[in-house]
Structures are given as structure tokens and as C-alpha cells.
Amino acid sequence: MSAPPTKEIANLSVSAGGGKGTAKRDALLANEAKVQALWEAERAFESDAVPGKTGVDNPDEKFIVTFPYPYMNGVLHIGHAFSLTKAVFRAQFERNRGKNVLFPFAFHCTGMPIQAAANKLKAEVGAFGVPPQFPEDDPEVRAKMEAEMIAAAEAKAAKAAPDKKAKGGKTKLVQKSGTGIVRQWNILKKMVPEEEIPKFVDPLYWLNYFPPIGVDHMKNFGSGVDWRRSFITTAVNPYYDAFIRWQFNTLRAKEKVLFGKRNNVYSMLDGQVCADHDRSEGEGVGPQEYVLIKLKVLMPEHGQDRHAKIKALLEKEAPRNVYLVPATLRPETMYGQTNCFVLPTGEYGAYYVDATDEVFIMSARSARGLSCQLFDTAKNQYYTKEFGKITCLETFTGDELLGIPLSAPNATYDKVYTLPLLTISMGKGTGVVTSVPSDAPDDYVALQTLKEKPDFAEKYSITPDMVEPFDVVPIISIEGYGDASAVFMCEKLKIKSFNDRAKLAQAKDETYLKGFTMGVMTYGPHKGEKVSDAKPKIRDEMIAAGQACLYFEPESRVMSRTNDECVVAATDQWYLAYGEESWSSAVKKHVLNQDTFNAYDPNALSKYDYTIGWLKEWACTRQFGLGTQLPWDTQWVIESLSDSTIYMAYYAIAQVLQGVDNLNGDADKSPSKIKSEDLTDEVFNYIYRNGLLPENTNIPAEALDKMRSEFRYWYPMDLRVSAKDLIPNHLTMALYNHAAIWDDEPTLWPKGYYTNGHVLVDAEKMSKSKGNFLMMDETVKKYSADATRFACADAGDSLDDANFSRETADTAIVSLVNEETWIKETLEAVGGLRTGDELNFMDNVLVNETNRLIKATEDSFAAMQFREGLQKGWFEMMIARNEYRSWCSDGGVPMHEAVVRKWIEAVIILICPICPHWSEKMWKLVGKEGLAVKASWPTADEEDKLLTRQAKFLRDTLKNFRASAGKAKKGWKNCSVLISDTYPQWKIDVLTWMQGEYEAGGSAFPADFMKKLKTWTGANLDDKKLIKFAMQFASFVKKEVEDVGTQAMDTTLPFDQKEILLASESYIK
């Protein structure tokens, strides 16, 4: 759900003054260039440790915020910018609060994406020349290719789910790319000069090209980074390479890195595990365990011609058994089998399984996955003799398998039949589905359809004896659902057809959940046991009896960046044992303790809790790609998520090792002239883990102590900012790795993570074909950095998708320039302003509003609620100033210089975290020394809540007057205002009752306040209209109490209304 624009930004009027066309935008850009040069000259964002202090002992003096380093296979886009602003805004806010702030930034190059893109480009250049002459450059050929792609996609969709009607229109790829034909050359052409493109066939060229551009774009955005601490990853940077080797040596010493065959998502094309950052689709998807149930194929007995191939196979393979092998998540329900389903139009194969000397009938896709998996983990025995290869003995259409008799293990029926099911997806499981109509709503509806619609059965040559004798077999009892939950739910929801997909999905979710959590077995040897207890026992018993075996596949489709659909494979692998009990328990304890970890959102916190629960073993190495070699087994490369878990600690020392303009870690540019080969494990242990001073090291003790003190000062990390999609992997893994490396110092573990949703552009998902795919630097050039940041702040802050509005960015340009003009003109005319200590009513109101909004903005920014902070620190500040200005102007009273200056100086710093370039210019304009980004947060006196009420009274009264005037009869020019200084008795009674409820609730209204109020008014007031008024009055006062405190319940009016109105008479008129 995208965040709607704030009311203020939606209603903000745009002045036509101040230039035409892009003049205002150009003025902002010109100022930004000057300000950025000033920051660089002043080294405004370079921060160093304070000698002798540590972050643990002085947590309120420093603040370090980090952001996941972006992957360098291109330039940054507005999605990066939106998430990035959360870190940038918070860093600047803490600077203005007087803290020593560090915001470092680096660039990620590890893994397969760059390698895969370079390989793809190399293939394109080899096939089509330089510059390449692609076939689709011919419009006729392109049209034909796109038509073929669309037809293939539709055919695939129809085969996977034949009952679903095609939506028509463009395929997803065509929608994303604009053509549907993706060429690496064309992707690069949008980012780099065409003459440079051939150089990108070398993956290392990407590492030299894009990171420096990233630095420039970040500077243009005004990101406030300490660039001395920047770097790239991989072995290209020898300093970072040494750091990662130390990390993994440490993890291995702590027995966190183990070796063995493990099931992981795997690309057969790449020949290695495919981790999240190696994927073009399916990030966060892991292996799912299924149980293959062996339904023994019996000799067909109905004399149907379509069974000729299966008969021949049975005769040829005898005495070897042939099985249909449905994949199920519910082996405990096999007692209720009444039949088996296949997709009539599906394509199946009979595959020889070496490990069991049996034949499995299944989809080619699932057979491909099975060939990569272990049959016997103890013996390291795969299902097939050769990894990744399986012999297909015969192929079948689903129709050729219909009506075949089967012997189903654990079933109460000796023989069941294969029946048609049109909703089977060939992209999930084996394409074969076992049927348990007692507990699976889809199965029940499909079986009943065949029984009740003879024409449908006849269409697929299903005879009555294949369906009529097979009744539902009750096997599980669920309280409230009976012993056939699927039947109960279908009758309850009135499901008559498998076209009732929404109802079927609801029925399935409910029966499956209740069955597992509340179900009790009523059949079989485990009768009387809870389903949750019986399920693993029945699974193991069936496997031991040779009736079933395990099979794995990704939870949903995963595509590698080389465009290979991934399987689950058991491969030799170094892996991180995240599931180890003491490790995961320590992380969970840290995360769920609000004193040690701040997730900023309870929904995010629950996601961390969930991830810690399922994250078990993580393959941490690959056999090729960019990265750091595993120090003790150099045939392996550490994968991109595993070399990205504690690098935040490297920021603390990067400026000593690498320094400015040295992303690649050139030893000649090292400020301390430290050589990477001298960075031994002993050196890193001294720096990071309180180890002993290394003997015989070439690194000066002064440099070692500098690095150690930097780390001890900046750690623990105060905040890490990221998009929410990194919760299931990187963010949680970072917690684990910190907990392992610093297991004896939990005070050094991360203190907080803030995560946001994805960003839409103008309420739509970014897409090149829609023209709303915005690159960060292009957006800055079009709107300016400050206006872009303004629109990012207004986009939203929750886990829901936010909305970057280009209209908001446009409006921000006008708003910023107009405010600059007003401030400048006001200060130039300062001689016309009042001075002195005497302040009138509206002077005090503006001062009070300024105080209130300073505090409200501070609270919002501290809670990472930047949209709310923008609302308070900009929009409401403008409203308060506009009211004051109008009051003074209409009343013929000059504004007060001190009051106006307080407001101006406050708004400049309140908006500084969001629009720092504008604030910097304004800070100089008002004659302030130093930098705005270093200025202190405005001081604010305690809000005078009584004065807030008085201002609200004037505001509301004026609104009512104007509304009444608009309704007045034509010619009426005078009115009378009746003022009372006391409440009527019924209001006094209500207020007195409310005071008692508030005190009885411990200085708070009870949760059932409105219910109690209704009872009280009914018992104490006779007039129905008066009861209604009393309810409305009490509700109003309750809100007032929340806003201004208990004085809102005073039975006497706390201020003189007449005095306020008389003081504002000219303004009112």
C-alpha cells in the first residue's frame, strides 16, 4: 500500500513568481554545487574517534549509522535513494543534536551478478560483433521475436494451469524492458558511453568503472559520507580481502563454519549454489521438503488404447516396480487416499532411479531436481549414479496415465485410480497429486465433480468403477470441524466447483492449519496422537518401509542471473551453522530485548523473530565468481551475503588502511603505508577482539592503537538502515556474525535496525516501459538534491510501499525558493519590525508553536518517522508563521523581530536533515557562523499548553465566524458575539465525572471509557439530545486532555475568551 501525499503538500499553493521555466530549480542546483564544495573544503563529514573514549561507555556522545553497500553492476536509482535517505536524514539529525556522527559508505562487488553480466556481454559481442548487430534491430524480426516470446509464455502458463484464462497483453518481461528482448549491451548503453562497452567483457572493469561514479552521485545527493572510509569488496581490494579471511578463520575456530553435503538452491547451468544475490527472481526462497509417496502402478484392466505405453513399460521393466510419485507435505493423511490426480495435458516421464532400482513417473522438471539429491544421507548416496543426470525410459501425456490402477501405501482401499485434475501446476511438485478428500478441499471437490457430472468423467474416459466406490475416509478429527474437515469447509463455504478458487484457498488454509495444530489422528497405528506429533513418525515409518522417500525443491520459482531455473541439490559445501541452538538463542535473546535492540516497528521485529526460527544452514561459498577465497580451502570463493555481515567494523579502520580516493586498496595510497600482507589474524584480533599486541609485526604500534581505538569508539553500531527484503538474509545474518565474532562482548552487537518498504513512483511500480524508472543522479539533476530528498521524506516511512511523487518534488522546488525569498525580504526589512521585550498575544503564540514543533520534529526524527517530521518541522511551521503574518498584517501590527528570528533560525535547522543545502545557504543568510550541518538543534522551552488552547480557540472561533458569515443573508454586515465565562451545569457534571474516571485509571482514561460514558449519560441525563451533546463534548475533551493535559477538564474556563477576541478584533474583521 503506497503512502498518500500529506494534506499540506497536496494543498500547497504554488506561486508564479521568482522566474520562469527551470530558474528556481537551477538556483537550487547552483547553490548545491557551492555548498558541496564548501563541505568538502571544510571536511564537514569526516569524523574521528575521541581518544580515550569507547562507544560502550559513552553511547550518547557518538552515533554511527550504516547502509547496505549497493551492488556495483550499474548506477544508483531512486529506490536506492529512498532507502538511503533514512540513514542520511538520521545521521544529519544526530549531528545537529551535537553528537559525533559517522556515516560511512562502500560498494559491493562480490558474487555472480557482475561475472554473469560480463559473460553475457562477451557472448553477445562474440556472436553479433562490435557494435553488435542484433537480429531484433530489424523491426519485422523484432515483432516476430516478441510475438514468439509472448506465445511461448502463454503456452507455458496454459500448460502449468490450463483452467486459468489468459489475461492477454504484454508479458512481464515486455512490461519491464519495453521490448521483452534483453541485451546486456543495451543495458550498459543506458549507463556508459557506447565506445566503453566492449571493456565490460572483463568483470574487473566493472569494479573500476561504477564505484567512482557511485561516489560522485552520492556527493551530488548531499549524502554526508566520510569518504575516507570507503572501499570495494573482493580480492581486488587486498585490505578488505584480508579482513574477510580473518573473519572466516575466526568463525571456523569457533566451529561456526562446517563442511558436508547440504541441500541448497542450486543452478545446474552455473554448477554451484545460487544464493539470494545470485538470483534474478526468487530472493529469500529456500528449500522445501516434500515426501514422495510411491503409488505402485498395476497392470491396466479396462482395455483402453491410451494405456498401451504404460503396459509396455510394465512388461519391459518387470519385475522392477513402477511408481507414480506425488509430492506431499502431509504424509500423515495417506490413510485417507481415494485416488491419484494428474493433469490431462501435462507432460510426464518414467525415470530410472539407480538408488532404489525403481521407476518413478513424474514431471521432467522434478526428475531434474531429484537427480541432484541424496537418497541416503548417511552413505552419501544420490538417487542417480551421476549427479544431475537421470535416465528417461518413456514419456507420457497426463491423458495416457488416466484410469491406471494403483496400489497406494497406507490407504484403506486396495486399489485406487488415476483421475483428472485441471488445476495442477506442472511448475510445483512432481505434477502428480495424491488425493485425500477428507482433509483436502481441492481433492474433495474434484472427486465429487467426477461423481456428480458423468459427462465430465466421460470426457476423460473415466468409468464409474474408478470413482463411485470411493467414499471419503475419515482419518483426522478437529474440534469444531468434525472428522472430515474438507467436507465440512466445502459445505460451510458452499463450494460447488474447483472454479471457486478464492473459497477453496480459504478452505485449504484453514483445514491445513487447524489439522496440524488441533487435529488428532483417528485411524492407523498412531490413533489418538496429535497430528503434529504423528506426522514426523509416519513420514519416517513410510521411508523406512520403502513406501516413500524425500524430495526437495525451492519454495517457489528461483531464476539465476544466468537465466537458469534452479533446483535443490545436495552438494559438498562449506556452510554456516546458523541453526546451532546456542548461537540462535543468543541472537534471539538480543533481538527480542528492547533494551539491547530497537527494530523501530513491531512488524519488523516479528520478521526477525521468524527468520531466526527458520534460518538453519547457509552455504557460504561458491566455486567461481568474484570475491575472497576461503583461506583454508582456496578452491572456494566466499559468497556475496557471507562476506557482508560484519564489514561495518571495517569502516572503523578503513581510513587508516586505505584513505581518500582509494576504493581498490592501492598500497601506494595507504595513509599509514601499511601493507595488506601484514594484516595477519593476530593483527585483526588485536584491533577487534582485545587480543595481545602482535609480535614481529611490521605495522607501527601507533597505527595499531589508532585502529583499535577507532573500533572501540564507534562500536557498537547504533543503527543500520535497509529495505525490508534484507530481513530474511543479510540483516539477520549480520546479527549472527556479530554474535559469533564478539560472543564474549554482546555490548558490541548491533543496537538497532530500521527497515522500510519499497518505493513506487507516482503510485506505480517503477518500470522502463512506463517511463517512471528514475536513476538517482538524473532525478537530482531534474529536481535538485534537496527537492528530491524532500519528496523522499514525504514518500512514507513504514514497511508498506512508499510513493515518490514527482509532483511533490516539483512543488518542493517552489516552496524552498519562495521561503528563501520571504526570509531574505523579511530580514532586509528588519527596520520595519517591532523590537523590545513586550510581546503581544500572537507573538507568544508563534513562539509557543515554534517550541512545540521543535520538540515534535525531534521526537519524529528520533523515531525514524521522517514524513511526520517533515509535517511538523516544515508544513506546520509554515502554517504557524502564516497565521502570525496574517494576524499582524490584517491587524496593522508589525511582526516582532525576535519572534521572527527565532522562527527562521528554528525552521532552517529543523529542515536541515532533509534539505541541508538550502539550510546551509539560509544559515549564512541570517548571519550565523559555522556550518548549518554542524549547528545545534534549536532549543525549545516547554510548550505552554494553555496558550496552545488559547490559540486553538482563536483559530476555531475564526473558522466558525467565517462559516457563519458565508451563510448570512445578503446585506447583513454586523453580528453579535456572545461570550460565557462558565460552562452550563450538564458540562460541569460531565467534566467532574471525567476527572474521576481519569484519576481512577491512574492518570489515564480506561479502555472502555466510551462504554462507561454511555452508561453514565443514560443514568444522569433525561434529554436524548443532551445525551448526544454530552457524548460529543466528552469525546472532544478526552482528545484535548491527550493534547494539553488535565487542565482541559477544569470546570472553570482557564482563560478569558473575550480578551483574546478583543486583541484580535482587527484580524477577525
Image: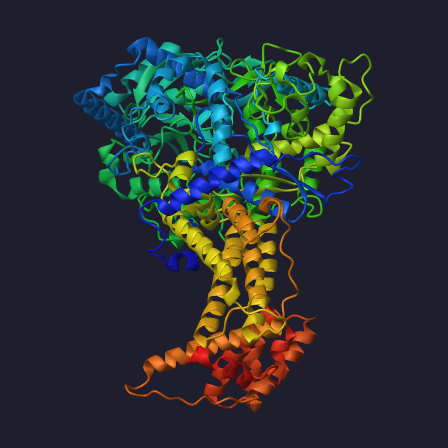
Which of these two is toward me, 331 or 922?
Answer: 922
Which of these two is toward me, 315 or 881?
Answer: 881
Which of these two is toward me, 635 or 183?
Answer: 183
Which of these two is toward me, 289 or 881?
Answer: 881
User: x, y percentage for residue 860?
Assistant: 57, 54
Left or right, residue 673 beside residue 623: right
Left or right, residue 751 beside residue 1058: right
Q: Which colour scheme is used?
A: rainbow
Q: In which quarter of the image is the C terminus?
A: bottom left
The residue drawn where x is 46% and y is 48% is: 790
The residue drawn where x is 47% and y is 79% is: 957
* In the depicted structure, whether residue 78 falls above or below residue 620: below
User: x, y percentage for residue 52?
Assistant: 80, 35
Q: Can residue 724 be seen in this view?
A: no
Outermost residue on the front side: it is: 831
Q: In which quarter of the image is residue 854?
A: bottom right
Q: Can residue 476 be seen in this view?
A: yes
* In the depicted structure, whether residue 1052 falls above or below residue 151: below
User: x, y percentage for residue 746?
Assistant: 74, 36
The residue drawn where x is 39% and y is 33% is: 339
Left or right, residue 50 beside residue 389: right
User: x, y percentage for residue 1009?
Assistant: 59, 73
* In the depicted structure, whether residue 207 falls above or below residue 103: above
Q: In which quarter of the image is residue 538?
A: top right
The residue drawn where x is 51% and y is 61% is: 877
Numbered label tally: 0
